[in-house]
Structure formats: C-alpha cells, structure tokens
Amino acid sequence: MSTDTILTVQGIDVFYGASKILFGVDLEIGRGRTLALLGRNGAGKSTTLKAIAGIAKPRKGSVRLGATELAGARPDVIARAGIGYVPEDRQVFPMHSVEDNLLIGAKRGPDGQDAWTLEKVYEAFPILAQMKERRAGLMSGGEQQMLTIARTLMGNPEVLLLDEPSEGLAPIIVQSIAALIRTLRAMGVTIVLAEQNMHFCLGISEDAAVIDKGHIVYRDTIKGLRANEAVTKRYLAL
C-alpha cells in the first residue's frame, strides 16, 4: 500500500441472503483523489459503497481507513471513524428545514477536525444558504442531492462516498453536481463515486475502477479508461 493511500478494500465478499453479490473486491483510494467506480446497473457499485459504509457487512475481506480495520463494524462506528456516505435515494428529513438537516449531520471528524462548519457549507453551497429555512421535502431532486452531500460533509469525513449522484437528474442539474464535485476535489476532499455514467465522471475523476457482476475487472486512471475502447464497449456501453 502506498504511503498516501487512505482507504483500502481487500478481497471483500458480500451476500444478500443466499445470493453472492461481491466477489473478492479490491480497491485502493489515494488521499485527496477522486475514484469513479463504474459499471452497469446491478454490477455491484452500490453494494461496494454500502460494504465500505457498513450497511452491507462483508462476509470476508478487509476495509481499512488508514490503519483502522472497519469491516464488520456498525455503520455509526464507521461514520465516526471518518467515512461519509451519501445514499442513492438521498434520504433528507422532509419536514425539517435545510438548516436543520445540516445540523443533524454535524460532528467533528475522527481527529477533532471541524473544517466543515455551517458557515463553510453555506460558502461552498450558496444555494443552500438561500434556502436554509425551506423544508427539505419541498426541494427539487438536484437541490436534495446537494443537501445530502452538504449534510454528510458536516460530519467532517476523511472519505466521501457518493452513490449515483447524477441519477434521475436533469442534464443542467447534473452539470451543477459535477461542478460541485470538482470544487470539493479542489478542496482536497477524498471522493469515491459509484456511477453508470462514464461521461459524467470524465471531468471530475482522476482514477477509475470498473465492476461487472461483482468483480473488479479494470483499474486505471480515468484518462486511461477513456482511451480503452474495448473495456468501455464491453462493460459500460448501454
């Protein structure tokens, strides 16, 4: 493992009931880098993120944040250790205001970090500052996506996991989410995003892994993946 690696996933198997979903998945994420985990619908992308976050417990294998083993730990323990998870279905508190949603997620990082305060979030997400009194349930899908990302950052995570951040959003909103991720990347946030849309990832990710039927079948930079027509046609073409 290189000295700047922050998250290491080694040989994890995950089952849903009797069905095996992940087969010995390996990933390595560098500090401050953005990794796109790409694959078709049902390939195992979301399950991989859920396994890292402790929502789907690996039956075997290792998930390490730095030197800390997380595989098998409860989701709340993993969150306190420094993993921030943004689910695919957003899960805002619809009857609460935007600001209340943000404050619900507020905590210091594992080493006492408090870089992401309410003020810092409003600076990075000006649209949320304008809507802070609005009920979250009255926001658009894109606005809710921004809110869930911001709420997760309020927990000052070491690694941010984004599950299908562009799914179901209008193209103009997808562009806004991409711009937001680029901003977070420029701030040094370590990001893993699970995505079907390779084109969405091209301008925001540095590294790429492709998953198919629960197996990691390709690893490279996103630039290398873009140039590999055989891989993109076989595993990512719709």
Image (spheres, grey):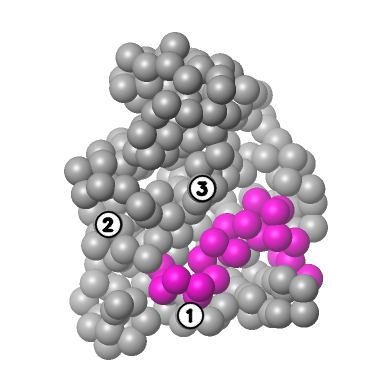
The answer to whether residue 70 is magenta is no
Nearest the viewer among 156 and 21 is 21
Label 2: few (<14), some (14–19) or many (≥20) C-alpha neighbours in 10 Å: some
Q: Which residues are magenta?
A: 38-62
* Disc 1 secondary structure class: strand
> For the residues marked 2 and 1, what is the alpha-carbon distance in whole angstroms?
19 Å
* Disc 2 secondary structure class: helix
Quarter of the picture holding the C terminus: bottom left
The answer to whether residue 55 is magenta is yes
Q: Earlier in the sequence, mark 3 or mark 2?
A: 3
Q: Are marks 3 and 2 in contact (CB under 8 Å)?
A: no
Camera sees residue 84: yes
Spot occupied by residue 36 in the image (x, y as percentages of width and height): 40, 60
Residue type at tag 3: Asp
Quarter of the picture holding the N terminus: bottom right
Q: Residue at x 25, y 47 (%)?
A: 170
Spot occupied by residue 49 in the image (x, y as percentages of width and height): 57, 58
Q: Which residue is mark 1?
A: 212
Q: Which residue is mark 3?
A: 89
Q: Nearer the viewer, mark 3 or mark 2?
A: 3
Q: Residue at x 63, y 40 (%)?
A: 82
Q: Residue at x 72, y 73 (%)?
A: 15
Q: Which residue is mark 2?
A: 200
Residue type at tag 1: Asp
Q: Earlier in the sequence, mark 2 or mark 1?
A: 2
- Residue 125 versus residue 167 in the image, above or below: above
Nearest the viewer among 135 and 218 is 135
